Image (cartoon, rainbow, N blue to C red):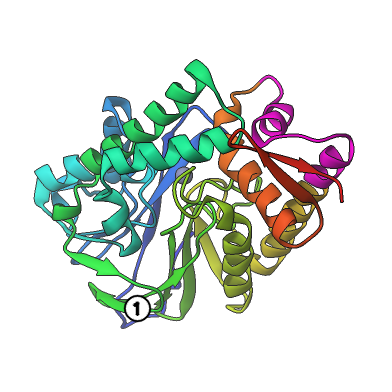
Amino acid sequence: MESPSTPAQSQATIHRIEIEVDWPPGHVDTYLVDGPEPILVDAGMAGEESATALESGLADADCSPSDVEHLVVTHPHVDHIGQVNALLDANSPTVYAPIGARERLNRDATDLGDTIRRHARQAGIRGEMLDTVVEQSVNSLERNRSLLDPDAVDVWIGDHDVVSIADYDFEAIHTPGHQADHLCYDVDFDGEQTLFSGDILLEPFRSVMIHTGLDTGVEDAVPAFLGALDRLDELGPRQVLPGHGPVHDRPGEIVQRSRDSIERMLDGAKAAVADGELTVLELAQQRAGDRDFHYVLPEVYSALAHLDNAGEISSRMENDVRYFYQK
Ligand SMILES: [Zn+2]
């Protein structure tokens, strides 16, 4: 991923730093844009090992955490904001983050817990499992805001905002679905149009819809993701630097592949409903198989709600549980 080497211009060299995580495809990537004011896009996974990996990745580029002047965040997930505090301690870079995350990170934990409980009950979750789901959501809010303290963010970025960072214009594109506040950043690096795509446009697979988790807006994940793909499709060819998986230059192809994947997922949900009435929990467990079903709950919730809204399936409520059935 060398930058173009036109002479007599300030040249950006972009270094990709891979940090291991223990889920597919096995790493999360941050990107260092070298220059007089080094920019880091995303801050890697949390934890000591990741801190070491980030430091050694920076060292490979003759840089260190204390050189980073700007830190740009795509979305507030643990593997993208893990080392924000370490970077703040090292050099206090200017921090840029999606505006939607401000409210989300400031969310009242009790209110969040109540909303999660209501949605989880509706999904058919009961008993100990219900407490676990609520607890996990509240814990993840608290972890995320300890990793990215909203008060530490200097610049909140909205859709289509163009923010000048070091010598470059970062144009934000709101791309929800994987995460509701997610931004991609489109930058012209001396003629090389480059998209920092965060957790969308991944080559190995489509990222799971987490969107708001089971918080308010959970049912919007499918249309949100499809809308994000439409927005990215309009951009046309460019270099894509994703948060996971290889760098590529085929956004159009990956957009189409992601749409197909969503289509298949919706077809699968419809087929499951045709096999017999079911709840979100039942379909999530079916889909997850041997794996932990928790992480597919929002996607399944949204898929069934989406099909229901579109009139492709029907639903009924009984004892606060929503059952989906074939029309
Ligand atoms: Zn990620």
Q: Which residue is drawn at 31% across and 83% down?
A: 8
Q: Picture coordinates of residue 22 (x, y %)?
A: 49, 27
Which residue, given by chain and number where applicable, does mark 1 sit on? 161
Q: Picture coordinates of residue 278 (x, y %)?
A: 76, 34
Q: Picture coordinates of residue 147 (x, y %)?
A: 24, 40
Residue 49 visible, this orientation: yes
Answer with left or right where residue 184 lies relative to residue 272: left
Residue 83 visible, this orientation: no
Q: Nearer the viewer, residue 245 or 2?
A: 245
Q: Which residue is drawn at 72% across and 33% down?
A: 283
Magenta region: 268-290
Q: In which quarter of the image is residue 111?
A: top left
Whether residue 283 appears in magenta in the rendering, the answer is yes
Answer with left or right where residue 188 lies relative to residue 157: right
Q: In this view, does 320 lie above or below 84?
A: above
Q: Which of 54 and 45 is in front in this view?
A: 45
Total number of numbered labels?
A: 1
Answer with left or right where residue 71 lies relative to residue 301: left
Q: In this view, does 273 lie above or below 201?
A: above
Q: Picture coordinates of residue 73 (x, y %)?
A: 33, 56
